[in-house]
Amino acid sequence: MLRLASASLAGTAIEFYDFFVYGTAAALVLGPLFFPSFSPLAGTLAAFGTFGVGFLARPLGSAVFGHIGDRHGRRPVLLASLLLTGLATVAVGCVPTYGTIGVAAPVLLLLLRFLQGLGLGGEWGGAVLLTAEHAPERRRGLWSSFPQIGPAVGFLLANGIILALSATLTDAQFTAWGWRVPFWAAGVLALAGLWLRRSVEETPQFRALAETGRRAEAPLAEVVRGHWRLLLLTGGALAVGYAVFYAVTTWSLAYATERLGVGRSAMLACIMAAVALKGLATPLVALLGDRYGRRPLCLLGCTLCALWMFPFVALLRTAEPLLMTLGFVGALFGMVTMFAVVGAYLPELYAPRIRCTGAAVGYNLGGVLGGALTPIVATSLADGSGPPWGVAVYLSGVALLSLGCFALLPETNPVVERTRSGAAAEAAAAPA
């Protein structure tokens, strides 16, 4: 299990590195380079617009790679999605700017961002099922949390490279060519990930499906026809996790550097510290999910997010590194309380024959609702001289939406459910 979980974590980290390095570049430099005729605010919004395209592509990637995963196995998904995302990311680093090729530059950027999202949409389902379908049920939450650590590792790697470049290059050098280096590094990381995953075994549950001939012929059609309500609920439930994460890691970076005058290196250091703590907390929270159930933690996480958004904005507005970091840590703690357990929760909601498609599409629908819109909406709401309380209202509203969706979902932890069933049976059998 440790070898499988490590391979899953490494690949997920590399793919999210590819995805996050674009988000950081969009917040810092892509607006002026690819949309120079826009005002600074409009250029940032346009850059975040191309950022959002990656999220719109993710459900499509989930459907495409989910079909492969449910029809041909989880293993091919792990290799193909990593290769696609890596190639698209390297290509972003090679795109000439608007000043060189004109309008073709943002068009190419948009296309490559779409391909990035397509690959990442398939990655999560394959990586999570690799661990969930191999893991013993009493520790399924723990082992399935390893792919959920991957985003934190990928974010730290992407921003660590950008932070190092910011510290060693002048602003002119970083704008001219330094921002491209993290994209080129994705090629080396993708090769390393493919090497790590080359010997990964197919999961026992898919092998059983293949041997008995019970694979779904059209997984997406089966999910949409028979489980459309579950699909919408999981998408709405996960929206707040994406919204909070990208409010912290992408919108706040642009807002603090452009509006509050905070240095780029200082902001990256604050955000990275919070994300590192999030990554460390993930397996610990997942263990609680194995002990007490998935649903209670998800409900708690949504509640924490709803309560913390106003303190988060207030602490960000101070422009003091320690206080901003405290705001980021509080927000991400609420987010990780639910996201640490969804690696086990979502696969348990779907039957094995449609699991790769159902879990991945539901997960990435949450990305569209929460991740694609949040930097754009937050940047628009923060367009004023006062504190951006509108951002706090928006994020709290998303948290309440997700809370309602989780409230309508069942508990899936088999150990918890058996314990409850046994207690109910004993109570029914006891004499009056």
Image (cartoon, rainbow, N blue to C red):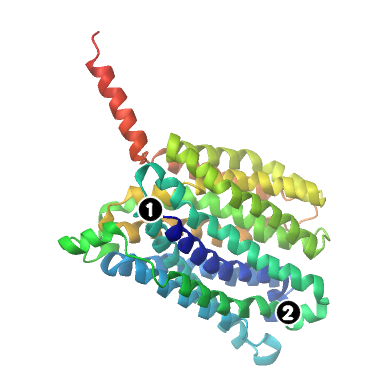
In this rendering, the label closer to the viewer, 2 or 1: 1
Residue positioned 67% across, 86% down in the render: 98
Q: Nearer the viewer, residue 238 or 161?
A: 161
Q: Residue at x 64, y 68 (%)?
A: 158
Q: Quadrant of residue 383?
A: bottom right
- Say the numbered circle drawn on residue 178: 2
Q: Secondary structure at mark 1?
A: helix
What SS does tag 2 mark?
Answer: helix
In the rendered image of this protein, does residue 252 appear above or below residue 101? above
Sort mark 2 into few (<14), some (14-19) or many (20+) by Cα contacts within 10 Å.
some
Q: Which quadrant does the C terminus fall into? A: top left
| Residue at the spot 24% in from the left edge and 66% down from the top edge | 218
Which residue position is annotated with label 1?
Answer: 132
Q: Are marks 2 and 1 in contact (CB under 8 Å)?
A: no
Vertical position of residue 111 compared to residue 281: above or below: below
Measuring from the top left, give residue 337's x and y in whole percent.
54, 43
Amino acid type, residue under disc 2 in the picture:
Gly
Disc 1 residue type (three-letter)? Ala
Residue 269 placement (x, y as % from top left) = 75, 59
Left or right: 224, with 266 as reference point: left
- In which image quadrant can residue 204 be found? bottom left
**Of callouts 2 and 1, which one flags the residue occurring earlier in the amino acid sequence?**
1
Work out whether residue 380 can be spotted. Answer: no
- Cα distance in 3D space between marks 2 and 1: 39 Å
